[in-house]
Amino acid sequence: MNQKPRAILFDAYGTLFDVHSVAGDLPALSQLWRQRQVEFTWRRTLMQRYRDFWSVTEEALRGSAAQLEIALTEPQIAGLMQAYLSPAVFPEVKTALDALKGTPLAILSNGTLPMLEAAVQASGLESYFSHIISVDRIKQYKPSPAVYAMGPETLKIPAEQTLFVSANAWDAAGAKAFGYRVCWCNRAGAFMDVLGFAPDLTVQRLDQISEN
């Protein structure tokens, strides 16, 4: 990066927190659950029929289990949902955040505030973030520009002076379209969506951000 950002905004799920740790012993369910979860947020935003991320996550779980013909009991569903309150963090997260100390750090996520606060507390990350920003405030989901606008509004720092970090290609593109400087954490070696909004920086691990 040519110039050090004045603040860094992190996506949460898939970037800091490993969503597949929640149902890791059921890989097919985990993959479809995540896919449906994201798709449902897009659809609800387009329909202007908002339900919070906790509700959307449960809807996606029930629908995915039904599609895969996996018979989950109500206690099993409750257990999987509870696991979303303490997902595993990726191994390099704390090292990465330690290396970025001195720059204001915050989270901007689709998650509800209770979900995010629980995950941050469970992983011992409370001291790193000055703000945890949830889409619940505006009842729209990423990649709506209104979501990304909450970053500058909260941090009082322009988007072009803020680095937005996400492991989700569609989220990275949405943030770039809004005006952020963007780092895409491409852990899986995936292809970037061809939307005309390429990230400024691509890394494989979050602890590589401080090296650029």
Image (spheres, rainbow, N blue to C red):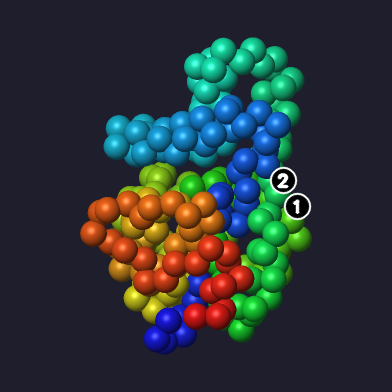
Q: Quadrant of the N terminus?
A: bottom left
Residue 11 seen in this snapshot: no
Q: Which residue is mark 2?
A: 86
Residue type at the position of mark 2: Ser
Q: Is residue 143 above or below residue 206?
A: above
Residue 212 seen in this snapshot: yes
Alpha-carbon neighbours of circle 2 within 10 Å: few (<14), some, or many (≥20)? many
- Label 1 residue SS: helix
At 49% from the left and 48% from the top, the residue drawn is: 110
Residue 23 coordinates in the image, percent (x, y): 67, 33
Specify the farthest residue to the left.
Answer: 196
Residue 121 appears left or right of 165:
right
In the image shown, does 180 or 187 lie closer to the viewer?
Answer: 187
Q: Which residue is mark 1?
A: 122
Query: Is there CB contact under 8 Å for labels 1 and 2?
Result: yes
Looking at marks 1 and 2 on the same chain, the residue that comes earlier in the sequence is marked by 2
Q: Is residue 167 above or below residue 42?
A: below
Residue 114 coordinates in the image, percent (x, y): 63, 47
